[in-house]
Amino acid sequence: MAVYLARNCPKCGNYWGVTIATSNGSGYQPVHGRCATCGYKIAWALFTS
Ligand SMILES: [Zn+2]
């Protein structure tokens, strides 16, 4: 499963889709964001434990 968020791109201000992959209880959630307009990308991780 994954959670999709709609944000504004920090670079160009257009629609920016962020995907959060839900973990299976490990407490680690990789987060990926990519702007379809300018190609700006981010990748980080959430530690929820
Ligand atoms: Zn952008």
Image (cartoon, grey):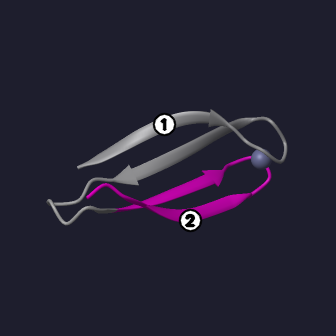
Query: Is the residue marked by circle 1 packed among few (<14), some (14-19), or many (20+) residues within 10 Å?
Result: few
Locate residue 13, reporting x and y percent: 80, 36
Residue 28 position by quadrant? bottom left
Q: Secondary structure at mark 2?
A: strand
Q: Amino acid at mark 2?
A: Ala
* Residue bearing mark 1: 5
- Quick check: is the Cβ at mark 1 less than 8 Å away from ligand 1? no
Viewer-closest of 41 and 28: 28
Residue at image point 68% right, 49% down: 36
Magenta part of the protein: which range?
Answer: 29-49
Residue at image point 77% right, 44% down: 10
Locate residue 25, reporting x and y percent: 15, 60
Magenta-span inclusion, residue 1: no
Residue at image point 35% right, 42% down: 3
Q: Amino acid at mark 1?
A: Leu
The answer to whether residue 36 is left or right of residue 3 is: right
Residue at image point 56% right, 65% down: 43
Locate residue 34, reporting x and y percent: 62, 54
* Residue bearing mark 2: 43
Magenta-span inclusion, residue 32: yes
Locate residue 45, reporting x and y percent: 45, 63
Q: Secondary structure at mark 1?
A: strand
Q: CA distance from mark 1 to mark 2?
A: 14 Å
